[in-house]
Image: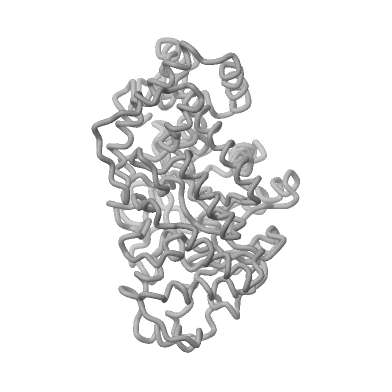
C-alpha cells in the first residue's frame, strides 16, 4: 500500500478556494487552507487536474489543450506583488466577483491584464535571479514547453481555430514555416512560457509549504487528451488520425444502465503500435511529469489501461464502438522500474471487469470506495462500497467531484429503501442536517488506509455545492468555498475524528 499509515485527507480543487480575484489560486488562501488541514490532522489534500481549462469545453480540468501545462488562472496576483512583478495599484478593478461561483469569462479577462503587466515588469526590471530561474525553467521543461507556447500563440494568431484549420505548413509543422512564424510572434511566445514559469514557481512554493506541514498532494491525470491540443498537434503520430489530422476513431464508454446510447467523449484514441515503437516514452514522460507535482497520482478512467471503448469517427452515439486492448501493463511495468514505490491510485469506478482487477492487483494499486454508492443496491449489505467490505489497500470517499454531496444525495437521490439501509447499517437516526456527519464518521472508521472527504461533505452542503454533474454542459466546475466557511471549529471537529479512529 502506497499510504503507510492510517490517515485522512480533504478533496478541494484549487479553483474552489476563496480569493478576491474571481477564482481560487495559489495565493494566501491556499496557505490558510493548508494551515487548517494541519490543525485538523489531515495528511492529504486532493485536487483535480491542474491543466489549463477552456471556456468552450465547459471549463473542465479534464478537457485541456495541454497535458503538461499549468492553468495560468491559478497564478496568484498577491504573490506577484511579493515577487516585485506587480504593484498593489495594478490589481484595482471595477469588477465585482462573486465569492460562491467562478465566472470564468470575467476572471480570465481580469487576469489577462495582470499577466501582461507582470510580464512587462519582468522584462523591464526583473531581477538577475528571476531571469536566471526563468532560463533554468525553460531548460527543465523543454520536452513540452516550446510546443505548448507555440500552440497557444499560433491558435490565437489563426483566430482561435482548431489546429487542423491553420495554414497547411503550420498545421503539418514544416520546420521552416514554424520557425518563421515563431520568430514573428516571439514576444507572445515568451510571455506564454513566462506564465508557465510563474505557475510552476508558485505551485512548487505551495507544495514545499505543505510538505513542511506533513501534507501531501493527491493529483489527478485524465486518460485522454483533447484533439485541439498542443499534444496532438505536436505528436500526431501518437493518435489515430487521418491525413488531414482528424480522428479516425474516438473515445467513449458503451451503453449501460445509466445510458442506452453510452457516452461519446470524442477525444482521439491512441495509436498504441506507434507508441510501443518508442517504448511509450510520451506516456512515461506524462506520468512522471505529474508525479513530480504530487505525492500521489490518481489515474482517471483506469479501466482504459486494460481495454478502452473505441468508436469510429462520425458516429453520433457510442453504441457502435468496440473494446480494444490497451498496453497498460507494459506502461506500468516501465513506470515501476523508475518509480518502485508506485505512488498511483486507480480510479476504478463504474463497470470494472476481472482483467482490470487483475491489473490493479499485479501492480498493487489501491482503488476507490464511495459511500454514497453503498446503500442503493438490492444486494443490501453485500456491496463492495460498504465499510465492512473495504480492504486495507483502498481509499474510501463519501463521494467525489462527479457526485452529489451527501446532503444532496439524501435530499434528492436516495430512495426510502436506501435511507433505511443506511439507518440499519449505521445504527443511528439522522436527517438532512447531520447525514454528512454519519457518512464522514463511517469513512474514518473504515479499515481503508486512507479516507478522503470532500470539503462539501465536511461542511454538510447541499446541491448548490456540487462541483460537476456529468453529461450536463453548464455551470460545472464553478463552485467555490466561501470565505470563513471552513474555520478552526470545523478543523477541530475533524481532528477529533482523526484521534478517535487512529488516522494520524
Instruction: Determine whether, in the image, residue 367 is placed left or right of residue 110.
Output: right
Instruction: Give the x, y percent position of residue 404.
Output: 38, 65
Q: Residue at x 60, y 60 (%)?
A: 41
Instruction: Determine whether, in the image, residue 346 is placed left or right of residue 224.
Output: right
Q: Is residue 450 visible?
A: yes
Q: Residue at x 65, y 45 (%)?
A: 212
Choose between 352 and 77: the one closer to the eye: 77
- Counting labels gives 0
Choose between 111 and 367: the one closer to the eye: 111
* Residue at the outermost front position: 489
Could you tell me which quadrant the C terminus lies in?
bottom right
- Asked where in the image residue 65 lies, by quadrant, the reply is top left
3 relative to 139, above or below: below
Choose between 454 and 386: the one closer to the eye: 454
Could you tell me which quadrant the N terminus lies in?
bottom right
How is the protein colored in the picture? one colour
294 relative to 487, above or below: above
Instruction: Give the x, y percent position of residue 409.
Output: 37, 72
Q: Residue at x 71, y 50 (%)?
A: 333
449 relative to 183, above or below: below
Instruction: Give the x, y percent position of residue 80.
Output: 46, 28
Q: Is residue 358 visible?
A: no
Instruction: Give the x, y percent position of residue 332.
Output: 67, 50
Choose between 370 and 27: the one closer to the eye: 27
- Asked where in the image residue 412 lies, by quadrant, the reply is bottom left
Q: Residue at x 36, y 60 (%)?
A: 466
Amino acid at each position: 500500500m502506497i499510504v503507510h499509515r492510517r490517515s485522512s485527507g480533504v478533496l478541494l480543487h484549487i479553483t474552489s478556494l476563496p480569493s478576491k480575484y474571481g477564482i481560487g489560486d495559489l495565493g494566501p488562501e491556499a496557505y490558510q487552507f493548508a494551515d487548517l488541514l494541519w490543525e485538523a490532522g489531515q495528511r492529504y489534500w486532493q485536487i483535480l487536474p491542474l491543466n489549463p481549462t477552456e471556456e468552450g469545453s465547459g471549463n473542465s480540468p479534464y478537457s485541456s489543450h495541454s497535458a503538461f501545462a499549468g492553468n495560468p488562472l491559478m497564478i496568484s496576483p498577491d504573490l506577484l506583488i511579493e515577487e516585485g512583478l506587480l504593484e498593489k495599484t495594478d490589481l484595482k478593478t471595477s469588477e465585482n466577483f462573486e465569492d460562491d461561483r467562478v465566472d470564468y469569462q470575467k476572471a480570465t479577462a481580469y487576469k489577462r491584464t495582470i499577466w501582461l503587466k507582470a510580464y512587462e515588469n519582468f522584462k523591464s526590471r526583473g531581477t538577475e535571479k528571476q531571469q536566471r530561474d526563468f532560463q533554468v525553467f525553460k531548460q527543465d521543461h523543454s520536452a513540452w514547453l516550446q510546443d505548448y507556447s507555440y500552440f497557444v500563440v499560433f491558435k490565437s494568431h489563426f483566430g482561435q481555430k482548431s489546429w487542423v484549420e491553420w495554414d497547411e505548413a503550420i498545421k503539418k509543422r514544416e520546420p521552416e514555416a514554424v520557425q518563421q512564424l515563431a520568430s514573428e510572434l516571439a514576444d507572445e511566445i515568451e510571455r506564454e512560457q513566462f506564465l508557465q514559469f510563474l505557475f510552476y514557481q508558485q505551485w512548487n512554493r505551495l507544495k514545499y509549504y505543505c510538505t513542511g506541514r506533513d501534507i501531501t498532494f493527491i493529483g489527478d491525470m485524465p486518460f485522454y487528451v483533447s484533439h485541439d491540443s498542443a499534444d496532438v498537434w505536436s505528436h500526431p503520430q501518437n493518435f489515430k488520425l487521418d491525413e488531414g489530422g482528424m480522428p479516425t476513431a474516438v473515445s467513449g464508454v458503451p451503453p449501460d444502465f445509466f445510458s442506452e446510447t453510452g457516452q461519446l467523449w470524442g477525444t482521439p484514441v491512441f495509436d498504441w503500435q506507434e507508441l510501443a515503437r518508442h517504448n511509450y516514452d510520451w506516456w512515461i514522460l506524462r506520468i512522471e511529469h505529474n508525479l513530480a507535482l504530487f505525492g500521489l497520482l490518481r489515474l482517471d478512467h483506469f479501466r482504459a489501461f486494460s481495454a478502452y471503448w473505441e468508436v469510429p469517427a462520425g458516429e453520433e452515439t457510442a453504441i457502435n464502438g468496440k473494446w480494444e486492448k490497451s498496453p497498460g501493463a507494459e506502461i506500468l511495468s516501465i513506470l515501476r522500474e523508475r518509480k518502485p514505490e508506485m505512488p498511483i491510485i486507480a480510479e476504478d469506478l463504474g463497470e470494472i471487469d476481472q482483467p482490470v482487477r487483475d491489473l490493479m492487483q499485479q501492480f498493487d494499486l489501491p482503488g476507490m470506495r464511495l459511500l454514497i454508492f453503498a446503500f442503493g443496491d438490492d444486494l443490501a449489505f453485500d456491496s463492495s462500497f460498504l465499510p465492512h467490505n473495504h480492504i486495507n489497500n483502498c481509499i474510501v470517499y463519501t463521494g467525489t467531484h462527479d457526485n452529489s454531496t451527501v446532503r444532496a444525495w439524501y435530499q434528492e437521490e436516495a430512495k426510502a429503501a436506501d435511507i433505511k439501509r443506511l439507518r440499519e447499517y449505521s445504527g443511528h437516526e439522522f436527517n438532512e442536517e447531520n447525514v454528512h456527519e454519519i457518512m464522514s464518521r463511517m469513512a474514518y472508521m473504515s479499515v481503508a488506509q486512507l479516507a478522503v472527504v470532500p470539503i462539501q461533505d465536511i461542511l454538510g452542503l447541499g446541491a448548490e455545492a456540487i462541483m460537476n454533474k456529468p453529461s450536463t454542459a453548464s455551470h460545472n466546475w464553478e463552485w467555490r468555498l466561501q470565505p470563513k466557511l471552513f474555520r478552526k471549529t470545523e478543523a477541530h471537529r475533524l481532528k477529533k475524528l482523526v484521534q478517535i479512529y487512529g488516522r494520524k
